[in-house]
Image: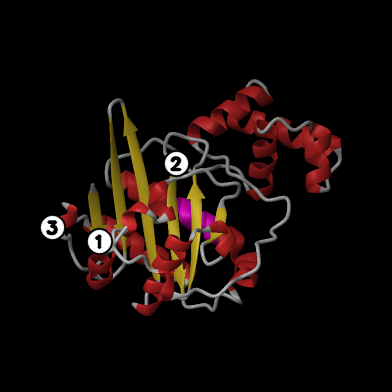
Amino acid sequence: MDLVLAGLGPLSFFAGRQKSSVCSILNRCRGEVGARHVAHVYLQRAPGQEETYISVTYPGRWLLNYAIRNYFSVDPVIRDDERPTSIRILNHVEESGWAVRAMLADAQSFGIGRSFVEIQVMPHSEYRGTVMFAFDIEPTAITKYIERKRELLLEAALQLHVDTLKARGLMPDTLELPELNCDETRCVSMLADGRTYAEIGEAMSWSEQAVIATLNDLCERLGCANPLNLVARCISQGWLRDFDDGFTPPPLSPLSTRVFPAKPH
């Protein structure tokens, strides 16, 4: 495992290697979105082995507590599990188990943040990773914040992910950031999911002809022979992402530190 801790240097029990450029990337992103802390995780898969790369802005005292309580085994940012949407509010009970809620309550008590937002980046590529923002925003207000800042958060998370992997030498410098705007990305993402032109148009409040024109324009702009070739290129570059047809997160329930297990799990 490799850990970069922004501003405080590596921790020996994580076998960390200091990367000053990554620290700068983390702190820049934190300032752009107004988060108290940010964490980036990338799980590199290779035949017969996996390596987890973690970059965070958390203080060392929280990471020590994190290690003692073995939160690594339950942290949804680390677990890299499947999820239905790109953005997930971890405070929501229905989207996290009791052990995750315990970890978040502990993080609140350490001053890490009040609301925790997890974003999956490049989910359709071999470079899939996760970014988590910790905000000093009350959980009751975080939903409205995401509705207003959704695109900012998605773009900031993607930029952080790409810059971090390139700084660590885990992604080729030739890999490009998306050349598609939000509507174009959504259009191609739905096409990749098997939706028809008519279904895409209905979801986006476009005519079927507008969908076809958009895809033809993208094919010409990106030098793709047809929409199938366009989808293949977007997938290979990791440009596609999951979109919600409607952002309706589950209701909130209060966190409680009383759900800690008797022994570290």
| Residue at 60%, 61% in the rendered image | 150
- Name the amino acid, label 2: Arg
Is there any visible trace of residue 114 in the rendered image?
yes
Q: Is residue 110 above or below residue 248?
A: below
Considering the numbered disc 2 on the image, is that residue within a helix, a strand or a loop?
Answer: loop
- Disc number placed over residue 128 in the picture, else none: 2
Q: Is residue 120 above or below residue 197?
A: below
Using the numbered discs, state the Cα–Cα distance from disc 1 to disc 2 in whole angstroms: 24 Å
- Name the amino acid, label 3: Ser
Considering the numbered disc 3 on the image, is that residue within a helix, a strand or a loop?
Answer: helix
- Name the amino acid, label 1: Ala
Location of residue 132 (image quadrant)? bottom left
Which is nearer the N-term, disc 1 or disc 2? 1
Q: Of all residues shown, which one is farthest toward the top? A: 225
Q: Which residue is mark 3?
A: 12
In the picture, measured across the screen, residue 78 lies left or right of residue 191, that is: left
Q: Position of residue 90 (x, y in %)?
A: 51, 62
